[in-house]
Amino acid sequence: MSSPEAAALLTMQGVQKRFGATYALKGVNLTVRAGEVHALIGENGAGKSTLMKTLSGAYTADAGEMTLEGKPYRPRHPLHARSLGVCMIYQELALAPHLSVMENILLGIEPTFGPLLNWPEIRSTSRRALDEVGLAEVAPETLVEDLSIAEQQLVEIARAVAVGCKLLVLDEPTSSLTQKDVRKLFALVHRLKDKGIAVIYISHALEEIEELCTRFTVMRDGETVGHGVVADVPVPQIIALMVGRAVEDLYPRSPRTVGEPIVEVRELAGAKFPRSASLTLRRGEVVGIAGLIGAGRTEMLRAIFGLDPQKSGEVRVGKNSAPASPGGRWNQGVGLVSEDRKSEGLAQNLSIADNLTLSKLHGLGPWRFVFPSRQHAACEPWITAFPIKCQSADQPVEDLSGGNQQKVAIARLLHHDCDVLLLDEPTRGIDVGSKAQIYAWIDRLALGDSSRHQPPKAVLVVSSYLPELLGICDRIAVMTRGVLGEARPVADWTEHSLMMAATGQDHLQSSA
Amino acid sequence: MNKEKTSQPVPSAGRKKNRIVELAGRLAALVAVYLFFVILTPVGKGFTSDANTQLMLQDIAVVAMAAIGMTIIIIAGGIDLSAGSVIALSMITTAYVLNLGPEGNKLVVQHPTLMPVLAVLAASGVAGAVGLLNGALVTCLRIVPFIITLGTMQMARGLAKLVAQEQNIYPPAEVQDLWIAKLLDPARTVFTFPFLPIAVWLVILAAILTALFLRYTRLGRHIFAIGSNEKTAVLCGVPVKYTKVMVYLIGGLFSGFAGILFFARLGSIGQPTEAIGYELFVIAAAVIGGASLLGGRGTILGTMIGALIITILRNGGVKMGWPQYTQEIVMGAVIILAVAIDNLRNRKRH
């Protein structure tokens, strides 16, 4: 286990964690060396989060051994783990927005003079930590709520640095960052590594792992199923380890026949964004919208769907050209999947059946009645067809993994039998297996099924993940600062040209 | 190492079992509270006597009736602090209508069939109007319901005092013989028809209908959706404003019905300063019954058990000869304990 160049900083041997009769961790072995970036890979529900919570002291392991720097490591609670040098940065940031940056950095470990806070030391310690993470321009007195998400994340890392962290865990750190901020973060991770800090990096983006990490460990079903050196193992093999089988083709694309236009957007402008968007969506095609985060893509979908007001322009759905409320759009056969399934897309403590049928409760009983048995019957086909992994349609959505939650959100549109599907970041933060199933469904919907009288549907996908857009779309348009460019056939685009257009460097496109 | 037991629960049986366990827990708490007082109350105080049981039934009917409405509001993610004042306003309106006409020639004496019906309609109408106002203000002003209903609580109380001219209203003695005064009259014995006071039957009927309404109608499911996540409801095209207004309207109506019962409970008089702070008992009944103030969670059956627990505690405390302050401390502790147990159970599930 020990290697000549670097000793193990952290070892985990046969770690188990049980909730009731269910094993969340069945046996985990993990070795992380000082000064390495170690990728922890696995589908959602594989047990990564449970493992990291065990590591950070939020959970106590039921069996197994952990050592830190050769000594037994048994964190009693997160603050204890932190004092031993193990720090977590969760996907959802854990900062107090109304407090200042420095109060956040030293929260819980404030230096004091007797009963009084030692403000000068708080200030200088935070200053040093902020400088170290590349936030030299941020004053320690700034309120956290005034910072961007990327800066807030760096403040969290500064919090770890300030306590002399030895092992830093980053859980999906890039999921809400722009490309530029991702570069900054990677540079910081490299600097931390060079200082001898070990980093455990959890991500679904295998490209990131290839770029950043030296070694990897793969988890599946609560067990570690493989580890190795990133440079020595080809990506398909890593994916095969994750899903337990080979993934044939992630992006299926059947030969589709494009039909009549079904949605026409003319010079649409919203309160702030979009500034101008024109687009025609036809049956039987998948159109992608690329662009940077904050370019106004989500706002465009919301304006089309009637969630945000329409300032000018026209959205024509079939024969209807008047602005409509979300309820009106559903009636016209348009459905939207929100980018934020947790706080908008799904009612977390309601059942799968309630969530899936919410937009279309009529037909589930006579008059204005809704029969639970019919609700269930309406859900069953989607639960089996997707498939959605759950105990029953009665289960609250909050019990499901992210991927399965997302499938419920999409299945709502299928239950409604929408002709137009507006999908906002449909695969963000979900595991590869679920992604593949969602791609397959998008393909199936755009293709239609004449034998079952299912006409082809129109799909509009907003995504920040370019390989996905290039993989599933027929046409792609790029949104730059609120202005939507022309939708061009996917063959005309490359990741590079999409990125150029998104950052506004593609002058050809704007003049075309 | 112990043997692995990765048996998955049988589909859906787990959740149903969970619900039954939860219900059993509440029933056990109810029985425990009741037995506590049965065992500890001095024999001479007559906690279990017929008279006292009837008294408790009367109190339960009032609290439970209002708590049905409150549960709907809480499930929708709201709160109604005006409930106590609306109960008083409804009671005053009932008394006022039954007291119309010149002294010695009251309308109710001439029209003993019509006037009670008018009284009920007027009381429900006024209470419904306050509910409607709550709903309209919450949806149009976009101010949290806590603040809105804190305001209407004062307004409804003021209105009750205005209608009553800051005095008790004593309708003519003939009212005592009308059905409206006898809503809470005990059945002759528990074994003769109608076994329980009429009002208790009305509460049971209302509870069943409301439970069915919440589970089996579109509006009912929309109420849960709005309480669980309003943004999701908007996204799914649920008519959020309409639903909210309906919720507060229904809540107001139930407080109004409770006020009519309160009129009978007080011996057919209207007291504008009665039922102060009553909204807290009503909210407590819903919360003890498992409703979440965050919305999206709650059951009528649970609330009914909560109403029973609250009433038994209040009555039992008096019978034990506890001073007011002890009663209040115990009541507060029970509310916190009930919610803490619920939270613990929910946390364990994850």
Image: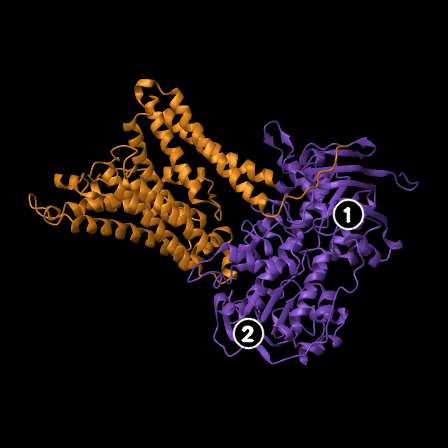
Few, some or many C-alpha atoms within 10 Å of disc 1 (few <14, some 14-19, many ≥20)? many
Res. B135 image quadrant:
bottom left
Mark nearest the camera among 2 and 1 is 1
- In the rendered image, residue A348, in percent from the top left (x then y), is placed at 56, 51
Q: Is residue A62 above or below residue A409?
A: above
A137 or A199: nearer the eye?
A: A199
Few, some or many C-alpha atoms within 10 Å of disc 2 (few <14, some 14-19, many ≥20)? many
For the point 63% across and 66% down, which residue is it? A295
Q: Is residue A465 above or below residue A221?
A: below
Quarter of the image that includes the C terminus of chain A: bottom right
Q: Colour of chain A?
A: purple
- In the rendered image, residue A357, in percent from the top left (x then y), is placed at 53, 59
Res A268 label: 2
Quarter of the image that includes the N terminus of chain A: top right
Q: Are marks 2 and 1 in contact (CB under 8 Å)?
A: no
B71 or A8: nearer the eye?
A: B71
Same chain for labels 2 and 1? Say yes or no: yes
Indicate the secondary structure of the residue bearing disc 1.
Answer: strand
Res A219 label: 1
Residue A484 visible in the current orientation: no
Res. B32 image quadrant:
top left
Residue B293 visible in the current orientation: yes
Q: Colour of chain B?
A: orange
Subunit ID for the residue under disc 2:
A
Subunit ID for the residue under disc 1:
A
Q: Mark 2 to mark 1: distance in Å? A: 46 Å
A311 or A142: nearer the eye?
A: A311
Q: How many marks?
A: 2
User: On the picture, is B107 further left or further right than A490?
Assistant: left
Indicate the amino acid at tag 2.
Leu
- In the rendered image, residue A266, in percent from the top left (x then y), is placed at 56, 78
